Amino acid sequence: MSEDQEMSFLNHLEALRWHLVRSVVAIIVVTIVVFSNKTFVFDTIIFGPKSADFPTFKALCKLSDWLFIQFPLLMRSRDVLCIGQEPYELQNIAMSGQFMTHILVSVVGGLILAFPYIFWEIWRFIKPALQATEKSYSRGVVFFTSLLFMFGVVFGYYIIVPLSVNFFITYNVSTQVVNLPTLSTYISTVTTIILACGIVFELPIMVYFLTKVGLVTPEVLKKYRKHALIGALILSAIITPPDVFSQLLVSVPILFLYEISIIISRVIEKKQG
């Protein structure tokens, strides 16, 4: 290896280091902001899905009422879909549990809120290595990647989290057993679902670039549609709590995103052809 090549490689490492440093600083700054707003973050956001006033539960109650009026013969009662109405408390059994939970939630919040900036820094490092044609079809990648990630986060927070949490809180094997969920298990469920949904919603972006470089075609995506269904079920089983309802809720949008990806791949192939 020549000295010029070695310096070039070291320069790349130096550039990458500063991109990573700025990303970490952004996460730390946002994490501190989240940490400083403990009451709002926990009482309003984190514990929102366990409240009867959560928008998802209120919407389901309104839907149940409307269905009862429109189809009285099909509905057992007016409030059959009114879930999440039973209050419950969380318990902490570890001495440092609440403090460590505060830190964990702050870091996760920092990652989510700083995601657009983090991806922008990564993209700034990758972009100079792209060809002119590659740069032309990657316009808006930071915006759309961030948008899809946030859509996934919102979907997970407002749909999957409240329904999953309610399922586990109300499920029982016997009246002799009382559910006493811990703070750590609740936080783990909420953060895992939200982050996983955010990542899953990046599927169209991934297919877009794979189609651009010729590694994926709409025909291939169609051919493996059944495999995608099985993959969606497996993935949903991994990223959601172990109940069929939550897995179906995640599988449906994954399959929808897969179909959208086929359309995107077809459009790109036509433009290139």
Image (cartoon, rainbow, N blue to C red):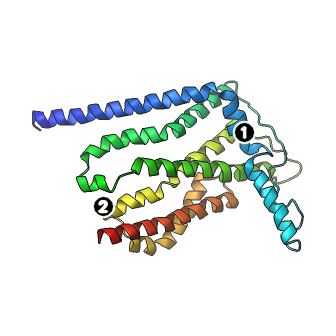
- Three-letter amino acid code at the position of disc 1: Phe
- Three-letter amino acid code at the position of disc 2: Val
- Crowd band around label 1 with a 10 angstrom C-alpha radius: few (<14), some (14–19), many (20+): some
Q: Position of residue 174 (x, y in %)?
A: 86, 53
Q: Nearer the viewer, residue 34 or 89?
A: 34
- Residue 96 shown left or right of residue 76 in the figure: left
Residue 181 seen by the camera: yes
Q: Position of residue 266 (x, y in %)?
A: 40, 71
- Circles 2 and 1: CB atoms closer than 8 Å: no
Disc 1 element:
loop
Q: Nearer the viewer, residue 138 or 87?
A: 138
- Residue at 55%, 58% in the rendered image: 235
Q: Quadrant of residue 45?
A: top right
**Distance (Cα) linking label 2 and label 1:** 44 Å
Disc 2 element:
loop
- Residue 208 shown left or right of residue 33 in the figure: left
Where 206 sits versus 101, above or below? Answer: below
Q: Quadrant of residue 173?
A: bottom right
In this figure, which residue is indicated by the disc labeled 1? Answer: 47
- Residue at 82%, 41% in the rendered image: 88
Q: Residue furthest left?
A: 2
Lower sequence index among marks 2 and 1: 1
Q: Position of residue 261 (x, y in %)?
A: 46, 65
In this figure, which residue is indicated by the disc labeled 2? Answer: 213
Please give the label number shown on residue 160: none
Which quarter of the figure is the C terminus placed in?
bottom left
- Residue 86 shown left or right of residue 262 in the figure: right
- Residue at 66%, 28% in the rendered image: 38
